[in-house]
Each structure stands twice: as structure tokens, then as C-alpha cells.
Image (cartoon, rainbow, N blue to C red):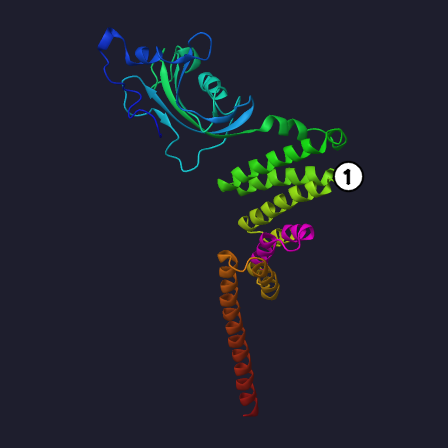
């Protein structure tokens, strides 16, 4: 991980001053548990707010035993780290406390005493009993889901008691969750989050002067849903959400493009062409739109060639039948 020591588990100069590497390291670390059970050393500062309780965090981490070069546990080799919810998915108490002291983008090193890590028994065969472990943690991002979960559990009547900005904030959080899941290719789970956001926005009535805020939020979610259903190979549903987006903004290039893609998959070539040409009119130099039009032209040529071949075979069979009948 960037900014960390090359081998955090095996620090240099083990015998100097008669102390172990972790004992020497602990002397310059900050106590964040109040009993020196969790010690912290910031390698790279983060920015923004601290992680909130019940948040879902996106982290890279590596855990080391003293005198060992290689981590006994790490997720740094994964292409996309898994989103983990505090209080549910993280089993080490020390890691929970450490994360609550971090900000987005921060990289830090922690020492966890046994009571905050694997206890008196350890975790055989990897972790010996009563072992202090070192973890390097990079906080990539976090999402505060507690507020969203509580709000979504309320009835429509209860939600109406809150100001519009609260509804928009919760809907935005649900959409952010959906975006994260989408990036992980978890399209079904992403669809669930997007639908929660859309339901909140559909249920909320706003005064005329604020309705544009609701419509703008809806548009983003509808575009996400259209794209997600394309990934789920359900083009008819993708088309439906794309058309709903066009009701809000009839010149939206993304919505036109998604509708064109859906129609192309369903082999509705004329409709696909209409949508894509309209999208190209809005964004003439968009490579995705232009490439989709080229794909449409190619598919349509293949389609017409097959139609011609089929007609030729039908008439050839008819001609042969007529000849036989005359004989």
C-alpha cells in the first residue's frame, strides 16, 4: 500500500534497546482506545468527516504478525474491495475503533493488543495465543447507511413530516450505494437500491418551486435503472425506464442512447435508429453513440441479407414445386 513501510511486520533493528519491534513502534503511536489496546500512526492524512457509526466502509487492509514479512490477512490483492458494514461485517474490535478514527483517503498503521484482536486463544494455526497484531488500513470511502435505513423503514405518512432536503439526501445515499454495487457488477443488488431511491422520490410531493429538484433526482435514478436492466439482459424494462427519463428531459442524450441500445437488443431496428439519431443530434461527437449507430447499420444489413436469403429460398421452393406439378 502506498506510503507504508516495505515490511511492516518485520521492523528493522530488532535487538536494539532490548525491545521488540512492536514495543518500539508503540512508543510513537497514539492511543485511541484509552487503555493503549489500540494504537495508531497516521501514514497519510485523509480529508472530510470521520467515519460514522453504522457506516459501510470501503477499505484496503493488510494484517501482520511480529517478525513476519508477509501479511497473514489482506484484501489488497482484490480488484474491487468489498463494502463492509460496521457492527456486522468487521469482526475485530480494534479495526472498528481504528476505522472510526479515520477520514476518507487516510492511510494508517495500527497495533491491536489481543483483547482488541484475536483474544487469549488466538486463531490457530495462523494467530498464536495472546498475540498483538499490526494492521495497515487505507480508507477509500464510506457511506452512512444508518440514516437511510431508518428513514426507509418509516411509513409514507411519517416520511412526509420531514423536509424535502432530507428525502433528497436519503435518495442520493441509496443511489450512491447502487452505484457502488454496480461498479462491483452486482447488478441485481444495485437495482434494489436504485428502486428504493425512486420509490422515495415518487412518494414525495413537493411544492411547484421545488419540484425541479425532485425531477432532477428522479432523472439520475431512472438513467441508472435503465443501464442496470441492460446489464441484467432485460431490454424491455431498460427501455421503459429510459422512456420515463425522457418524459423528464426529452433531449437527454443518455436516456436516448439507453433506449436505442434496448431497442437494438430487441431487434427493433427502426426504433433503435430513431433514438440513436436523436441522441447523436444532442451529442454529435459522442463515440459511444456513433459506434452504436455503426453497430445498428451492421446488424440491419445482416438482418436484410437474411430476409433476402429466406425469400429467395421460399420462392425457389415454390418454383420447384410448380415444375413438379406440371410434370
Question: In the figure, is residue 192 to the left or right of 293?
Answer: right
Q: In terms of depth relative to the viewer, which is nearer, 177 or 25?
A: 25
Question: In the figure, is residue 138 to the left or right of 227?
Answer: left
Q: Is residue 30 magenta?
A: no
Q: How many marks?
A: 1
Q: Quadrant of the N terminus?
A: top left
Reply above or below: 302 against 50.
Answer: below
Q: Residues within 10 Å of mark 1 (few under 14, many from 20)?
A: few
* Residue 97 image point, x, y percent: 48, 17
Q: Residue at x 55, y 82 (%)?
A: 315
Reply above or below: 263 against 183.
Answer: below
Provide the residue span drawn in magenta. Answer: 241-263
Question: In the figure, is residue 113 to the left or right of 319?
Answer: left
Q: Residue at x 34, y 25 (%)?
A: 4
Considering the numbered disc 1 on the image, is that residue within a helix, a strand or a loop? loop
Q: In terms of depth relative to the viewer, which is nearer, 206 or 97?
A: 206
The quadrant in which residue 262 appears is: bottom right
* Residue 129 image point, x, y percent: 35, 12
SS assignment for the magenta stretch, majority: helix
Is residue 134 visible from the viewing direction of this image? yes
Reply above or below: 292 against 25.
Answer: below
Disc 1: which residue:
207
Amino acid at each position: 500500500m502506498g506510503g507504508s513501510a516495505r515490511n511492516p511486520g518485520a521492523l528493522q533493528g530488532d535487538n536494539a534497546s532490548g525491545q521488540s519491534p512492536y514495543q518500539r513502534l508503540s512508543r510513537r503511536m497514539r492511543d485511541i482506545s484509552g487503555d493503549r489496546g489500540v494504537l495508531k500512526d497516521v501514514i497519510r492524512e485523509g480529508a472530510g468527516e470521520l467515519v460514522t457509526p453504522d457506516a459501510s466502509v470501503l477499505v484496503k487492509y493488510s494484517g501482520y504478525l511480529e517478525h513476519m514479512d508477509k501479511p497473514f490477512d489482506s484484501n489488497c490483492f482484490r480488484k474491487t474491495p468489498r463494502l463492509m458494514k460496521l457492527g456486522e461485517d468487521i469482526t475485530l474490535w480494534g479495526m472498528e475503533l481504528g476505522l472510526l478514527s479515520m477520514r476518507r483517503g487516510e492511510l494508517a498503521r495500527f497495533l491491536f493488543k489481543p483483547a482488541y484482536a484475536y483474544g487469549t486463544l488466538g486463531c490457530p494455526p495462523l494467530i498464536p495465543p495472546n498475540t498483538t497484531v499490526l494492521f495497515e488500513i487505507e480508507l477509500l470511502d464510506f457511506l452512512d447507511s444508518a440514516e437511510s435505513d431508518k428513514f426507509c423503514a418509516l411509513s409514507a405518512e411519517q416520511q412526509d413530516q420531514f423536509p424535502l432536503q432530507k428525502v433528497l439526501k436519503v435518495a442520493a445515499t441509496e443511489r450512491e450505494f447502487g452505484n457502488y454495487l454496480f461498479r462491483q457488477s452486482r447488478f441485481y443488488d444495485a437495482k434494489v437500491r436504485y428502486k428504493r431511491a425512486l420509490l422515495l422520490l415518487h412518494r414525495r410531493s413537493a411544492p411547484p418551486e421545488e419540484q425541479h429538484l425532485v425531477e432532477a433526482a428522479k432523472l439520475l435514478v431512472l438513467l441508472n435503472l435503465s443501464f442496470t436492466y441492460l446489464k441484467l439482459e432485460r431490454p424491455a424494462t431498460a427501455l421503459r425506464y429510459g422512456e420515463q427519463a425522457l418524459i423528464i428531459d426529452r433531449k437527454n442524450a443518455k436516456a436516448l442512447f439507453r433506449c436505442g441500445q434496448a431497442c437494438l437488443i430487441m431487434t427493433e431496428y427502426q426504433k433503435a435508429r430513431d433514438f440513436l439519431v436523436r441522441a447523436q443530434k444532442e451529442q454529435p461527437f459522442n463515440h459511444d453513440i456513433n459506434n452504436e449507430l455503426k453497430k445498428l447499420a451492421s446488424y440491419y444489413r445482416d438482418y436484410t441479407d437474411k430476409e433476402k436469403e429466406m425469400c429467395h429460398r421460399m420462392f425457389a421452393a415454390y418454383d420447384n414445386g410448380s415444375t413438379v406439378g406440371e410434370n
